[in-house]
Amino acid sequence: MIDQIDFSKLETTLSNTKKKAAGLSIIRLILFFGIFVVAIVGISEVRLLLLLLPLLIGLFVYFILQFNKQKDKEAFLKELISMRGDVQLRKERKLSTFDPGIEFQEKSHPFANDLDLFGEHSLFQMLNHTVNKGGKEKLVNWMKSQFDPSSAKERSTSINELSTKGEFLQSFEALGRAFIKKEKSKDEFYQWLESSISFKSWLFIPMVLGPVGGLALLIGTLYFGLAFGWIGLWILLGGAFLATVFKPLQEAGSIMPNQGDIKTFSFWSALLVKENFADERLKTLQHDFKNEEIEAPKVLESLEQKTFMIQSRLNMVYLVFNFLFWTDLFLWWRLVIWKNKNGKFLQKWESNFDELQVLVSLGSFAKEERSVCEVEWLDKEIIDVEKITHPLLHPEKAIGNDFSMDDHNQVVLLTGANMSGKTTFMRTLGINMVLANLGLRPFAKRFEMGNFQLFTSMRNSDNLGESVSSFYAELARIKLLLDTAEAGTKVFFLLDEILKGTNTADRIMGSEALIHQLYAAGGKGIISTHDIELSELEAKLDYLVNKSFHSEITDKEIHFDYTIKKGPCPSFNAHKLMELMGIRFQ
């Protein structure tokens, strides 16, 4: 299906596919009425006409299959075209139509809740190209994972290679979007695959006798005057044999995955085995589908066919064939053979597909954003970035900043006017660290960092249900940070306007004590504050440095350059902001 597609002419190909599907639909309808007419005339008047039925039925089935292929192709092409629009929306940072992943927000997580990883206008909306629950959850786990330079480097090589394979990325995502619709848990099915089930040997006799005897009775009745009553007795006899497999087939049908899931797995495996990878991680994932032991595409295509047959057993056409030829016995035999031979592979394949979905998501992000910055992971406790910007801001509006902290600088005290960019800068730094940990290129000209674990405290809110004030929530957050650092973890912290829930005197005293304690525990990071008095600590503490964001105040306006500068902020703008909002000072 994919081999026949020219990605530069999707609309034309879609139009031609629709025309083919419409033509096949007409042919299928003609054949259906032809079968009906031949059957009626053959039974009532010219029996020899019935000899045409097998040919007509064969052609009817063939054209059904061809029609279904064209409809699958049509669904695939529609998704490819739709994805073009998604690329443009992400490029313009218009993310409201994408899944926000709100259910993955987690207040207790070290950094996820403060850095816009999930929710409206979030990194998840930029990254997520997964199509099912398993893939989405694995992406979330990677986004929330502890920082690990070795894993990040390994992922990076996979992502960089995938970012050069545009058609593979588009095809993989579009196939999932086209066919995975209403997902169904596979847990019971996997348990069934691990259970011990065999085909009773004595059932081979009725399995062979069914189609032979049914065909003989049908010919005898139609051409040699055999009484129709014999067919009734045959159906009753078959009922006894069919009853032995009715329940196990029903149970299998109820727990089997949705046909769309298996169809997607089949297409994915066929796409995967044709691709050539240089990266070892990708080759390892591919090997489970492309080895000497088993051909995954054929195995999954076979499961798709069996799933369709088992879940369509109550179809009237199937019921007629089943009663005449006892086809359930053959279907059960083939299912048991498939299970015992191939069932052990399916869960592992799904796990690989989940990981591939995440890598395809990250590869697509890398391809679309085209960042060229390489991450340099260092053994030293430093961070050094140049022209770093926030990935959720429109690239044309984002202002890059340079920032560094060497071995001796443990704390940056960040002061600045309201709305000048302090919090946005801290989130910029944090979210780019998350990108680096995922194996992605940060939004910067240069990015060097040591092996830290990120910890943030920015959005501490009250909780009426738990009778927790925002100040107490912040204190609990800070305690967790201190416990983590004092336990020996190398922490890089981002603390925004600390202790803002108390009076100025207590806030300054508490902030100074916290700075001392974080330094003693080996923590490193940025603390933003409006308390300019704290900037005097730079003269007392050789590990603390002042940096700031400024604003320029005119008669009726406040201007910001959103650029970080050395030293404390020389002036603040709260007074002017209140005036602009209508508050008159006496």
Image (tube, rainbow, N blue to C red):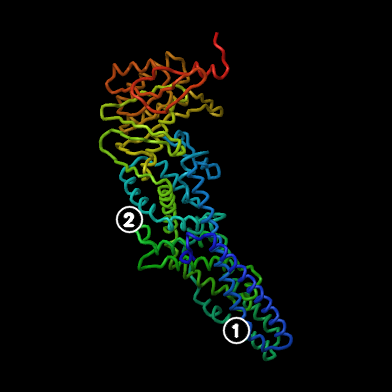
Residue ranking furthest to the top: 586
Give the residue at x 61% y 84%: 215
Indicate left or right for 345 with 62 as reference. left
Q: Which mark is residue 582?
A: none
Residue 252 in view in this figure: no
Q: Considering only vertical position in the picture, is 416 above or below 296?
A: above
Q: Label 1 neighbourhood size at 10 Å, few (<14), some (14-19), many (20+)? A: some
Q: Farthest front residue? A: 555
Calculate the distance from the C-alpha at mark 1 to the C-alpha at mark 2.
57 Å
x and y percentages locating residue 449 in the rendered image: 31, 37
Dot placed on the residue nearer the N-terminal end, 1 or 2: 1
**Badge 2 is on which residue?**
279
28 shown above or below 456: below
Residue pointed to by mark 1: 213
Residue plotted at (30% across, 30% down)? 405
Compared with residue 211, is residue 106 higher up or lower down, i.e. above or below?
Answer: above
Q: Nearer the viewer, residue 236 or 322?
A: 322
Question: Disc 1 marks which amino acid?
Answer: Gly
